[in-house]
Amino acid sequence: MNVLLLYLLLLKATLTSFSGLTSLPMVRNDLVVRYRVLTDRELNTALVAGHTGPGPYGLYLVSVGYFVAGIPGAVAGWLALVTPAFLIIPMLRYLGRRAEQPGVRSSIQAVTLAAAGLIISSTVPLARDAITSLLAVAVALGSFLLLTATRLDTLWVIAGAAGVGLIASVLH
């Protein structure tokens, strides 16, 4: 894939998202479904790599770019990630107090809800690829229940899931 096209596709995904993961449906649709230059497994790996260390949620785009086009692709992913930061200053200047108007606020809420729906729709195929055993289903379901039913910090849920996986690998 042409690196410029990769940059434009990733930029489109970041410009139309409110946070790092809301770009995921567009990235999956463009690179996995439409152009077939990335697999769901590679996209899962890029997500894990992007969320392993500190940094913005959209950092997985650098890994996506690397999987698609090597080092030039990683640079394209990074550029797509940082370009909106340079565009936000003139946009904020233009919006100014208009963001407080009810119509603008309602539009932002509607787009946020639509983005949540898109995240759910792109999570299903990725989960099918990642959750391949009964233990993985149990860990995913248990994590979901703990996070939704308690005020337990996410870090402890992740640590517990990692501990279960470690114990299962030792016993297996």
Image: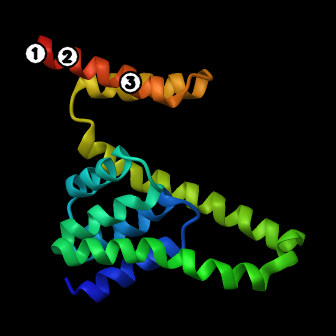
Which class describes the residues within 10 Å of circle 3: few (<14), some (14-19), or many (20+)?
few
Q: Position of residue 37 (x, y in %)?
A: 19, 72
Q: Which mark is residue 172?
A: 1
Disc 3 marks which residue?
159
User: In front: 46, or 102?
Assistant: 46
Q: Are marks 2 and 1 in contact (CB under 8 Å)?
A: yes
The nearer-to-camera label among 1 and 3 is: 3
Residue lying furthest left: 172
Report how far apart the C-alphas of labels 2 and 1 lie in the structure. 6 Å
At label 2, the amino acid type is Ala
Above or below 6: residue 117: above
Q: Which mark is residue 47?
A: none
At label 3, the amino acid type is Ala
Report how far apart the C-alphas of labels 1 and 3 lie in the structure. 20 Å
Report how far apart the C-alphas of labels 3 and 2 lie in the structure. 14 Å
Which element type, helix, strand or loop, lies under badge 3?
helix
Image quarter of the C terminus: top left
User: In front: 143, or 133?
Assistant: 143
Disc 2 marks which residue?
168
Image quarter of the N terminus: bottom left
From this viewpoint, is residue 37 visible? no
Residue at (29% x, 17% y) in the render: 164
Above or below 21: residue 4: below
Identify the image quadrant of residue 52. top left
User: In front: 124, or 136?
Assistant: 136
Which class describes the residues within 10 Å of circle 1: few (<14), some (14-19), or many (20+)?
few
Above or below 149: residue 74: below
Residue at (32% x, 28% y) in the render: 137
Among numbered discs 3 and 2, the one appearing first in the sequence: 3
Q: Position of residue 40 (x, y in %)?
A: 24, 56
Residue at (30% x, 18% y) in the render: 163
Identify the image quadrant of residue 10. bottom left
